[in-house]
Image (cartoon, coloured by chain):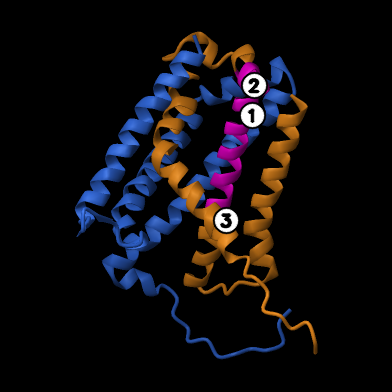
Chain colours: A blue, B orange
Amino acid sequence: MNKRKPYVRPMPGWWRKNPYFIEYMIHEGTALFVAAYAFVLLFGLWRLSQGEAAWNGFIAALQSPLSMLLHLILLLMIGYHSYTWFKIMPRTLPPLIIGGKRVSAAAITAGGFIATLLASLALLGIAWGISQ
Amino acid sequence: MKNRQLKRSHAPIFWGLFGAGGMLAALFGPMLVWITGFAAPLGWLPAKAASYQGALALAQNLIGKAVLWGLISLLLWHAAHRIYHSLHDIGIHGGPLAKSLTYGVAAAGTLWAAALLLGV
């Protein structure tokens, strides 16, 4: 595929040698679970498009213990994504200045967690409202 | 060698999709999984939440279509971008195959979701 073969220093498992990098790799690994959840939604949409029997089959599958286990893992991993997303936000965001003072890292992270809480409550309220 | 103008980088587009999907997942992800994985199928929400009519009404509503399409595609683009760049960390250095398995899958999922939503 690629004729040019530059020397690449072999460093398999480099991230296992440092707790900071282990955390980094777990954080990056949550992307796989975000993708998995997107596929669950996409699959549900596909079943919905096939009619009532297909949709009911999808709901029955969601009620199985295997699906519960999968969703518990999804919940933990996407929850971890949410936690780290706001934890590193002070470093991913350009410096935020309010009233001439730089907003502290802790305040940015706390703001993110509060926003998540509010967004979650709003979403639950909307889901409750439209499903009545 | 004329027309060697510096082309505008397409990186900001992918970065934007990554950022939007990451923010969506961070703000709404846990509650979404809780609703679609537990609350709706187990009947903790009103019965319409898991019913065919309820789901169909959501997918047929214009705002519902936009929400579902945005959600599915942005989560896919976020994951694709992150996985593509993480491949480097585990010793797989880019290339067309890695691109098609990440961004390509996200693009296919985006198109498929659009086709399904236009069809219902």
Please state which amino acid type lies under the numbered disc 3: Ala
Query: Distance from label 3 to label 1 (Cα)?
Result: 22 Å
In the rendered structure, does residue B104 fall within the stretch colored magenta?
A: no
Q: Quadrant of residue A26?
A: bottom left
Residue A128 in view of the camera: yes
In the rendered structure, does residue B57 fall within the stretch colored magenta?
A: yes
Range drawn in magenta: B55-79
Q: Residue drawn 40% across and 44% down? A: B26
Contact check, label 2 and label 3, Cβ < 8 Å: no
* Label 1 residue SS: helix
Q: Residue drawn 33% across and 67% down? A: A21
* Label 2 residue SS: loop
Please state which amino acid type lies under the numbered disc 1: Lys
* Tag 3 residue: B80
Q: Which mark is residue B61?
A: 2
* Label 3 chain ID: B
User: Is A98 left, or right, of A14 in this rendering?
Assistant: left
* Tag 1 residue: B65
**Image depth: mark 3 or mark 1 in front:** 1
User: Is A73 left, or right, of B61 in this rendering?
Assistant: left
